[in-house]
Amino acid sequence: MPSALSLQCHCVLIFLAALRGETRYLEVRGAGEDEPFLLLSADLKRELAERQLYQRALRCIDMLSVEGQFTFTAEQPQLHCATFFIADPEELISIDYDFVNIDCQGGDFLKVFDGWILKGEKFPSSLDHPLPTSERYIDFCESGNIQRSIRSSQNVAMIFFRIHEPGNGFTFTIKKISNLFPCNVISQTPTGSFTMVIPHQHRNCSFSIIYPVVIKISDLILGHLNSFHLKKPSTGCAGMGDFVELLGGTGLDPSKMFPLADLCQSFHGSAQMKIGCDNTVLRMVSSGKHINRVSFEYHQLDQYELENRKENSIEEFCFPSI
Ligand SMILES: *[C@@H]1O[C@H](CO)[C@@H](O)[C@H](O)[C@H]1NC(C)=O
């Protein structure tokens, strides 16, 4: 029985697919316009390029993965709207309001959330986010400041809004900013690879994949390349300051997911796991004493692999229909 999250994730996927289509279209159009640019000065070219910002209207429920300028205009009272933003793992998102015309006194609102929320579950979890939960919401009606640029702490963010009066709306510009040490990430794709590095920081980072996957960890370095001197812990990784855990579950919040495996010894090689959950998270717990690093790749479990659940007890854990 597919859960509500997986249905929503499928919607998210459809949006992503649609967005990719648009991106391709833009690339093609851009290529055709290259030639006349050769005659222009660098400054002028830059100015023109900036003016060619991608623009489109926003739907009440929408998903954005490209930079550009987006406008929402209510055609009727719109009471429950949200826009999800997602960038590459090594990017943050910046949101600038260009124009806002909403009736704060009349009950309208426009809020940015630093992360994603679905069905009350947050990513990053409140335990792993650098800010307290209340500071992750930025309410336009409270701050009232159109000048301020809002920057996410990870590659995902979202906007919630409610507008009663037809014709009212807002316009914002989305830019992506590069992030040298991504900590919390939601993968845009069901297949990929990633290296997470936590350099001497006392923080915990989660990489979330909103699909059932096979995940293969190829390298794990917790402080030392060579940790033969470490005693093998008898009860999981309890008491270890630095470790990696694999979590599985149906919601977005890593702190509400089931722990499936703990890894607290460095290794080179390959550890592979099938995780038949709607959502898979690799979370690194870091004491700040070491430079911790983990490399992994993942691909979506196909239907055959999902049905053919033998060898691995881990996948049974998440089997929704059993
Ligand atoms: C990281 O997670 C561990 C275990 O989940 C917890 O004990 C620790 O306090 C967390 N550290 C930070 C900085 O949140």
Image (cartoon, helix red, strand yellow):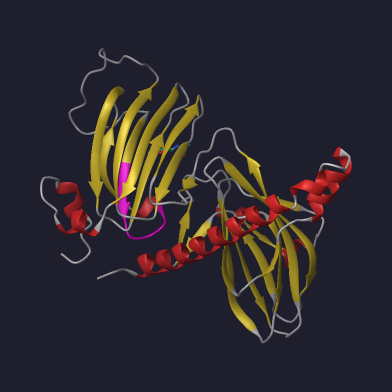
Residue 141: image location, x then y, percent: 74, 68
**Which sits in the foreground, 69 or 79?**
69
Q: Residue at x 76, y 83 (%)?
A: 167
Q: How many marks?
A: 0
Is residue 298 found left or right of 93 in the rendered image?
left
Span highlighted in magenta in the image? 246-253
- Front-lying residue, 69 or 17: 17
> Depth check: 79 or 307 in front?
307
Instruction: Give the residue at x 43% y 26%.
Output: 292
**Residue drawn at (19%, 57%) of the image:** 304
* Quarter assignment of residue 223: top left
Decide if residue 170 is on the left or right side of residue 278. Answer: right
* Residue in front for this viewpoint, 267 or 235: 267
Vertical position of residue 111 compared to residue 59: above or below: above
Horizontal relation, residue 188 to residue 294: left or right: right
- Figure quadrant, ligand 1: top left
Is residue 249 in the magenta section? yes
Q: Quadrant of the C terminus?
A: bottom left
Could one spot residue 211 in this view of the protein?
Answer: yes
The quadrant the N terminus occupies is bottom left
Would residue 120 be visible to someone looking at this image?
A: no
Q: Position of residue 9 (x, y in %)?
A: 41, 63
The location of residue 136, given as percent across then percent down, is 60, 54
Residue extending furthest toward the left: 310
Q: Position of residue 257 (x, y in %)?
A: 33, 53
For the point 32% across and 14% down, the residue is 226
Q: Check residue 282 for magenta coloring.
A: no
Task: Determine which quarter of the picture holds residue 21.
Answer: bottom right
Considering only vertical position in the picture, is 69 above or below 73?
above
